[in-house]
Amino acid sequence: MSLNMINNINFLFVTFFGIGTIRYAPGTITSLITTLLLFSSFHILNLSNAIILIILITIFLCAFLAIANYIKDDSNKDPKEVVIDEVIGQSIPIYMYEIAHGINKDSKEAILFYIYIFILFRFFDIKKPFPINFFDRKFKNSFGVIMDDVIAGLYVVLTLIIFMVIKSKLLT
């Protein structure tokens, strides 16, 4: 495999098959496509949680190397076209939602939660409350690019847990 071919594959990976090169809102579009892909994986294809987890962990681990390689000679260490981090961040709350609901999945309820998850993830990823902004500012490498989205995803999980606890207290 030539170096040029490796660089092209790497580019396709970090830009999520070129979606990152879309002029307007590439992160939002990537998050939306990720949401749709995961909904399809869980509710239409009925892939097992284990298979999806293996895919997500593989993407997560490969992203560190791929982003590091992509930004190594670039002065901008968090280029707009790198959106594989949105795939990772958006996947965390969706996967957590799905494993929390076991094998009995209600697709209609899931659609609502997927919409909430999508909106909340975009909110946290764009607003970058602490410590998201810390990782975004202080780590100008693949770790920083990925971790701000991981934390945004974890904020979504925390927000949904708080919502469900409050809802359960009000309804009992």
Image (tube, helix red, strand yellow):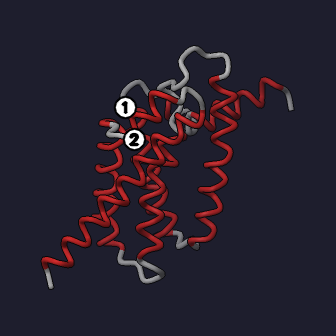
In the rendering, at what x and y percent does residue 171 appear? 14, 81
Q: Quadrant of residue 62?
A: top right
Q: Which residue is mark 2?
A: 131
Lateral position of residue 148 relative to residue 166, left or right: right
In the rendering, at what x and y percent does residue 93 appear? 42, 59
> Among all residues in the image, which is located at the extreme top?
75
Using the image, determine if residue 48 lies above or below residue 26.
Answer: below
Q: Which residue is mark 1?
A: 25
Instruction: Decide which of 162, 100 is in the foreground and name it.
Output: 162
Q: Sequence-wise, which precedes: disc 2 or disc 1? A: 1
Count neighbours of disc 2 (C-alpha within 10 A) and say few if under 14, some if 14 to 19, many if 20 or more: few
Using the image, determine if residue 107 lies above or below residue 94.
Answer: below
In the rendering, at what x and y percent does residue 56 appear? 59, 56
Using the image, determine if residue 162 lies above or below residue 101.
Answer: above
Quadrant (top left, top right, bottom left, bottom right) of the N terminus: top right
Quadrant (top left, top right, bottom left, bottom right) of the C terminus: bottom left
Instruction: Decide which of 163, 70 is in the foreground and name it.
Output: 163
Q: Secondary structure at mark 2?
A: loop
What amino acid type should be assigned to the residue bearing mark 1? Answer: Ala
Q: Residue at x 60, y 33 (%)?
A: 142
Q: CA distance from mark 2 to mark 1?
A: 23 Å
